[in-house]
Image (spheres, coloured by chain):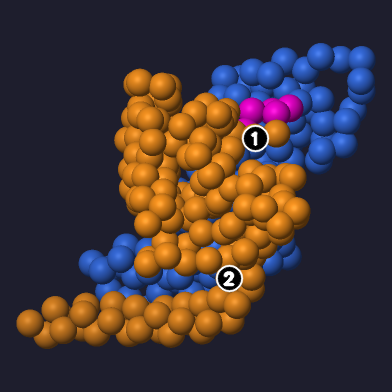
Chain colours: A orange, B blue
Amino acid sequence: MNQLLKFGLVLGIICLVATLVLAVTHEVTKPMIDAQGRSEEEAALKQIMPDADSFNKKAADNMEYFEAVKEKNVVGYCIKATGEGYGGYIRMMIGINPDGVIKGVRILEHQETPGLGAKINEVRPGEKDAWFLRQFVGKSARTVEVRKNIDSITGATISSRGVTDAVNKTVTEFLAKIKK
Amino acid sequence: MKLLGEFIKGLWRENPTFRIVLGLCPTLAISTSVFNGIGMGVAATFVLVGSNIFVSLVRNIVPEKVRIPCYIVIIATFVTIADLIMKAYAPLLSRSLGMFVPLIVVNCIVLGRAEAFSSKEPPLKSVMDALGMGVGFTWALVLISAIREGLGNGTILGIPLSSRFDPPLFMVLAPGALLTIGLLIGAMNYFTIKKHSRD
């Protein structure tokens, strides 16, 4: 009993100190990390819709999206979506034109397995964008489905499906919302 | 002098990659560019130094039976700090290393040094050991990634080497990593054996 108490105490103290140190580090780095996230979002927007003049941030219910504006006309939407992958959530940005045809998909954050699921965002040497995501361009977002018109990544069906389903579901919901 | 010896042994005689052959998973995966190699090496060195100091400081109060959870908590703390700092100040590096930064937790070199060295030795010696291992790991990564990036992509740190040569892509893919590491370990063994037979 005495020994058990000592084990718990030592481990507890170490964990407590570790928690304190991490809490401080988190507080210090949080503003910087948030700023990086925002600038990544902006970079993704520009990549998906290179010809838009400006983006207006909007929100519908719990959906966050950007209106891409060119010469005062809305030329498309960039919607933030979250899919469920193999290693956790996959956050992405989906760009569509007003009819729901995909202009581009960019992964903002993921925790997929390196070498397998992480290939959803793999850029082959000498290329500019991820080969898996390139499949989506030009397809109607409401029709994309793994094994139908999207090839899944070998050994990473769950990750491939996570992205594809999120694109399909998010855009379908989104279009229903703005048509109202 | 003794302290310097603890540092030097990690560079060659007990090099973590080529002699002890630990931590190969991240080595294989991230040595696709010199930039990645340096980043991973620095992050791992930071974690090694931090965890070695603290493991050494608590070595007399941590009971034998719960030592592994204690070490893991200490290591995980430093890994998380490294990950957060990288995300905040070097987002590009953080993105290209991806999952491999959090995975330093399970890098055998770090736990290996805690278990084999710093849990038995005073802090100063442990720091020197960690620095030696860290620098040894870093130079190994830089060498491997320079060969792979140079041959497979025709660049070093993104600077093109020659326009006249068509780089074989497989060098930056998984087979290139296995080939490079295998040949380097073979070469190192050859020289070590040759040196021993001369002595």
x and y, in percent, of residue B97 in the image: 59, 48
Q: Which mark is residue B60?
A: none
Give the quarter of the image for residue A121.
Answer: top right
Q: Residue at x 72, y 45 (%)?
A: A50
Of residues B71 and B31, the one drawn nearer to the viewer in this rendering: B31
Count of numbered labels shown in the rendering: 2
Q: Identify which amino acid the numbered label 2 is placed on.
A: Asp
x then y, percent, for residue A18 = 42, 78
Residue B140 seen: no
Q: Which residue is mark 1?
A: A129
Local packing at callout 1 (Cα closer than 10 Å; few below 14, some 14-19, many 20+) is some
Q: Amino acid at mark 1?
A: Asp
Q: Looking at the rendering, in which quadrant would you find the C terminus of chain A?
A: bottom left
Does mark 1 fall on the same chain as mark 2?
yes
Q: Is residue A62 left or right of residue B123?
A: left
The image quadrant that residue A131 belongs to is top right
Q: Position of residue A160 (x, y in %)?
A: 39, 33
Q: Which residue is mark 2?
A: A34
A81 versus B163 height, above or below: below
Cβ atoms under marks 2 and 1 closer than 8 Å? no
As for residue A125 lying within the magenta part, the answer is yes
Residue A101 or residue A129, whichever sits in front: A101
The image quadrant where one finds the N terminus of chain A is bottom left
SS under mark 1 = loop
Identify the residue at horizontal 57%, vertical 59% (top origin): A66
Please give the range of residues in magenta: A123-127
Mark 2 crowd level (few <14, some 14–19, many ≥20, 10 Å Cα): few
